[in-house]
Amino acid sequence: MKRLALVVALLGAAGCGRHDERRAVDERLVLALEEARAWQHRADVHLADGDAAQAIVDVEAVLKVAFPPASPEGEEARLDAWARLARLHVGAGDEDKALADVAAGRREATRDSFYRAHLETAAGEVFEARAKRLDGDAAKAARRDALDCYARSIEINKRVQAALLKEAP
């Protein structure tokens, strides 16, 4: 919905022939989001060809995209990239790197959002994968960690939904 509003705003600004600072920021944001999307699509193609290592390189490139400072959409694209990297790394058998990806994303998160919750879900998936690899108490502890991550995701989503309901007309 935010992206639709942004596109409408851009079209309105373009139609009026205005070249103010807001429009320049919006154009930079749209261009950065499109670049991030193209990197994610490249990763999809590499995964379809069975090349997870190149997919990881492509998703890491999203983290190098120059989003306008403090743009919520840029933060969301980065959090999405961190979550995807965690999934790719755990799929490659590197749980430590996957958890480092989650930690990096958590450090960058400045607010609750779908993508902040999504990052916690990815963390839960890492701990689930760990539980499958372990036995006994260690597996049980990893499952508890997964449940904690999922609980955080649920709570973030509840807060976002509550905020949206307050904004609704």
Image (cartoon, helix red, strand yellow):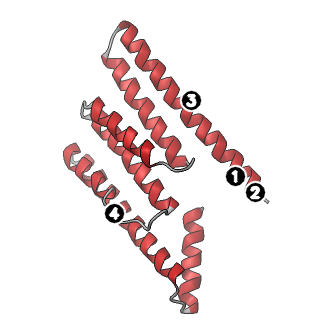
SS of the residue at dot 1? helix
Q: CA distance from mark 1 to mark 4?
A: 29 Å
Q: Position of residue 62 (x, y in %)?
A: 33, 57
Give left or right: position of 85 versus 46: right
- Quick one: label 1, few (<14), some, or many (20+) residues within 10 Å? few
Q: CA distance from mark 3 to mark 4?
A: 31 Å
Tally of numbered tags: 4
Residue beneath disc 3 = 151
Say which amino acid is labelled 2. Answer: Ala
Give left or right: position of 127 versus 57: right
Let me know if residue 109 appears in the view: yes
Residue beneath disc 4 = 65
Q: Position of residue 9 (x, y in %)?
A: 59, 77
- Quick one: label 3, few (<14), some, or many (20+) residues within 10 Å? some
Q: Counting residues from the N terminus, which is met first, the one under dot 2 or under dot 4? A: 4
Q: Are marks 3 and 4 in contact (CB under 8 Å)?
A: no
Q: Counting residues from the N terminus, which is met first, the one under dot 1 or under dot 3? A: 3
Q: Residue placed at 55% from the left, 81% from the top?
A: 11
- Quick one: label 2, few (<14), some, or many (20+) residues within 10 Å? few
Q: CA distance from mark 2 to mark 4?
A: 33 Å
SS of the residue at dot 3? helix
Give the camera-side residue of 14 and 116: 116
Residue beneath disc 2 = 168
Q: Counting residues from the N terminus, which is met first, the one under dot 3 or under dot 2? A: 3
Q: Residue placed at 42% from the left, 33% from the top?
A: 123
Q: CA distance from mark 1 to mark 3?
A: 20 Å
Residue beneath disc 1 = 164
Which quadrant, please, contains the N terminus? Answer: bottom right
Say which amino acid is labelled 3. Answer: Ala
